[in-house]
Amino acid sequence: MRQIAEKKFIKHNFLLNSKEAEILYYEYAKDMPIIDYHNHLSAKQIAENKPIENITKAWLSGDHYKWRGMRANGIDEEFITGSASLEKRFQKWAETVPHTLRNPLFHWTQLELKRYFDIDEILQSSSAEEIYTKANAVLATKTPAQLLEDMNVEIICTTDDPTDDLLCHKKIVEAGFYTKVYPTFRSDELFFIGQNKFLNYLKKLAAAVAFPIHNYADFLKAIDSRIDYFHENGCRLSDFGVGGEISKEDFTIDEITVIFDKNLKGETLLPVEIMKYRSSLMLYLGKKYHEKDWVQQYHLGAIRNNNCRLQEQLGSDAGCDSIGDYSIAEAMSKFFNILDSDKKLAKTITYNLNPADNEVFATMMGNFNSSGIPGKMQWGSAWWFLDQKNGMEKQLNTLSNMGLLSRFVGMLTDSRSFLSFPRHEYFRRILCNLIANDVNNGLLPYDLDFLGRMIQDICYYNAKEYFNFK
């Protein structure tokens, strides 16, 4: 098996192609705290705060990016999500890493090894055993809270179901960790009317609010109760990630009441009835988020669970999702316009998965800004498959052309791994290099202090001001 000869890859000027880029990064961006306002970290793990102990657990337990890379490299599923030993699974990942060249996995892997373990060597078959031993020795001494603090992570926002008791978040508050951990109200399960799991979910929701749900009015009352509970426990964001698009069907409340009753009786719903229900619920939730002064997030454009074989074997989030080609603009326009006309449009961040929609999303958000709230409507950071150098540069350039880069709330990890926070460094280096290139090409004034302060805003201060964390 061929091996990469270079021993040290992450150097001082990684992704920084000029002295101006280095100045902007090292003097302005590098040491800014991190506000990671969207991720999938486990609040339970943080609350328990026990060392992860093993690099395989930290890297391969739940990381569908790596799973996809290993599958593409022909690795047997036993070594990806199966029962193989932790060391053997790590060895197979190490064998895969050299094949990830030009994929963000290669850069992320080397950055994480450098920042958490001070390891310069490229991970590959020949270095796997030594790196495995050294990384595990470090992880044995580091709790999740310490890993977060080491990366100067000031705030993270987990992704939480409306029925979550948030007891882990309460324990984290009591523990007084450096990193503040806030819940996010992820509404997805509320939208699956017509599916078998929805009635079971209603029972779970009823248990959470301690009253029965007999009709649509009870359902909305239960939602109100959970939103209040989340707010009391520090939540200031919502998130939506159902399917590819926003529903846009017209409806009346009487129609929705009948549709909900039909579902409770076990009757089959028509597709148009499901879309009417979803349209109604989206608007209801949007108004509640505005009432609470939350930031609402919409992740749009994914086709999920494409591989039935792997879904049956592993469940959802198994690395079998991809980019969709939905028609999104009209529905977004209608949704935001209704809320805006009622003066009930909350601060909003949208994320597109299809890069063909970049200009659609960037220009759509500019239609609904309001006085007194700079950057109220945000087109969010490059998401998921676009969360790589090329995708980030395209997002930053399109945002600059269509909106105000200076008001951007910046990067997030969207990750399930406690070792993912060097992705903020990755973003910051790319941002600094982009701005420096414009300076050197005569497109921006040669005022590095002014530009550096704008970069600090994008990396930290804009998010600090935008979200109402207490």
Image: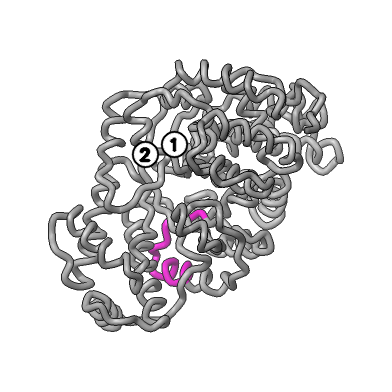
The x, y position of residue 392, in whole percent, is 68, 46
Q: 144 left or right of 385?
A: left
First in residue order: circle 2 vs circle 1: 1
The x, y position of residue 183, in whole percent, is 36, 43
Q: Can I make out residue 283 in this image?
A: yes
Is residue 283 placed above or below 71 in the rendered structure?
A: below
Q: Residue at x 72, y 41 (%)?
A: 100
Proximity of marks 2 and 1: CB atoms separated by less than 8 Å: yes
Mark 1 closeness class: few <14, some 14–19, many ≥20 residues within 10 Å: many
Q: Residue at x 82, y 43 (%)?
A: 443
Q: Residue at x 25, y 38 (%)?
A: 167
Q: 449 left or right of 375?
A: right
Dividing the picture into quadrants, the one containing residue 46 is: top left
Kind of residue indicated by mark 2: Tyr
Is residue 261 placed above or below 304 in the rendered structure?
A: below
Residue highlighted by disc 2: 182
The x, y position of residue 383, in whole percent, is 59, 51
Q: Secondary structure at mark 1?
A: strand
Bounds of the magenta span? 335-349
**Outermost residue toward the right?**
441
**Outermost residue toward the left?**
211
- Looking at the rendered structure, which numbered label has been put on residue 156? 1
The answer to which of 124 and 412 lies nearer the viewer is: 124
